[in-house]
Image (cartoon, rainbow, N blue to C red):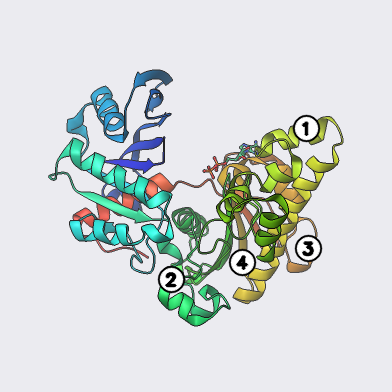
Amino acid sequence: MNVLVLNAGSSSLKFQVISTEPDRIAKDSDERLIRGEVERIGGEAIVTMQSHGGERQKTTAQLRDITAAIRHLVAANGQEDIEAVGHRIVHGGERFTESVLITPEAVKGIEDCIDLAPLHNPTNLRGIAAATEVFGRKIPQVAVFDTAFHSTLPEHAYLYAIPYHLYRRHGIRRYGFHGTSHRYVAHRYRQLRALAREQTNVITLHLGNGCSAAAIRGGRSVDTSMGMTPLEGLVMGSRSGDLDPTIVNVIATKEGLSIEQVETLLNTHSGLLGISGLTNDKRVLLEESAMHEDHRVRAAIDVFCYRVRKYIGAYLAAMGGADAVVFTGGIGENSPAIRQQICEGLEWAGLRLDRERNQALAGSEGAITADGSTLMGYVIPTDEELLIARDTVRIIRGVPHPS
Ligand code: ADP
């Protein structure tokens, strides 16, 4: 079955076409037919497309909205090929604990979660509406939620210590995000080590533009660093991560900003960008710091790595120990220097980095620790789209979820 995987953003659409079937999943013989992205939807859009084994092609087209963008990519590839659509949906609240077939009821459920993700869920819903418009109701669609994998968090990990009625009334609790990525790398880790799901005890670190850590015990997420929104936890490209909530009021008062403006500042002008004053791009920061000493660039990198290490320690305590730390995401997969700095000083926990192994891994999969380490380190490139395609085909074929 050819599954079109869609990740609809406010002005962009990431897509892949993946051919898969339940019996091919076990053999890892899924096939990626097309991948690409449409950026700047709403005007002269930039379309990047790469078909299996082909060259990456970049073109421009006048694309008014997501519907026009989907029509454009279907026209370029042939509609009869698409047999199902899988959507990445950011927030499933407490209602969606796993992927679901998209029905009018499911759409209503995603709408009910808009309050929790006012920026993301509406764009995701526009993606569903656009796919329905283009393909009609005959082609089944499936929703895969960023939050679902973390629905197994125990109460002591998801409750904030604020008046309980605020949780009841407004759903204020930790939900966690990047769930599809954490789930994928945990799955891949146990495949690499030939373990059963119940034997999977790992700390997964998704370090990309957004960054989050997850504590996975017995194959289930038992804690994660992002909270009610993706702002909490690790330092990110432009998000602050953890801070004292009083700071919001202090910034608003001292800088004459509204609460909304402070929220924007914490989401888009903070993190690596905020400290360095230069960029949210880790690669650029590393190049800068290699070329000349800049205190703020160094501080941005140091704060970032220290926060990750602190979470590793916290999750080791939360889980009663782990077997491995798994790095993924743009930074986690590609930056040996950052991995090394994070792992420095974790020897007490049994993590002994093998510098050569670590240096050799960029964008590929494998161990980065010395043989005999009791806490292993792995790099596993994430593949959220593959998991979305697999969930889609499993649900449509009626094959039970493996996890
Ligand atoms: P997203 O979270 O949006 O999916 P990615 O996982 O693609 O983002 O990660 C993007 C981040 O990865 C950027 O900050 C980029 O600078 C960083 N990155 C990519 N390659 C490298 C590299 N070789 N060294 C350091 N950082 C890198």
Looking at the image, can residue 142 be seen? Answer: yes
Instruction: Say which residue label 1 marks.
Output: 288
Residue under label 4: 323
What whole-number distance in Å separates the C-alpha atoms at marks 4 and 1?
35 Å
Residue 222 percent coordinates (x, y) = 52, 71
Q: Position of residue 292 (x, y in %)?
A: 85, 31
Task: Name the amino acid, label 3.
Answer: Glu
**C-alpha gap between disc 3 and disc 4:** 14 Å
* x 75%, y 41%: residue: 276
Q: Earlier in the sequence, mark 3 or mark 4?
A: 4
At x 41%, y 41%, the residue is: 9
| Quarter of the image where ligand 1 sits | top right
Residue occupied by mark 3: 347
The three-letter amino acid code for the residue at tag 1 is Glu
Q: Earlier in the sequence, mark 3 or mark 1?
A: 1
Looking at the picture, which amino acid does disc 2 mark?
A: Gly
Q: CA distance from mark 3 to mark 1?
A: 29 Å
Residue 2 place in picture, x, y as percent: 25, 39
Judged by depth in the image, the label closer to the viewer, 4 or 2, is: 2
Pointer 2: what residue? 171
What's the distance in space between the residues labelled 2 and 1, CA to CA? 43 Å
Q: What SS does tag 1 mark?
A: helix
Bin the neighbour count of mark 1 within 10 Å (Cα to Cα): few under 14, some 14-19, many 20 and up.
some
Residue at the location (64% across, 41% down)?
A: 361
Q: Specify whether 271 is left or right of 105.
A: right
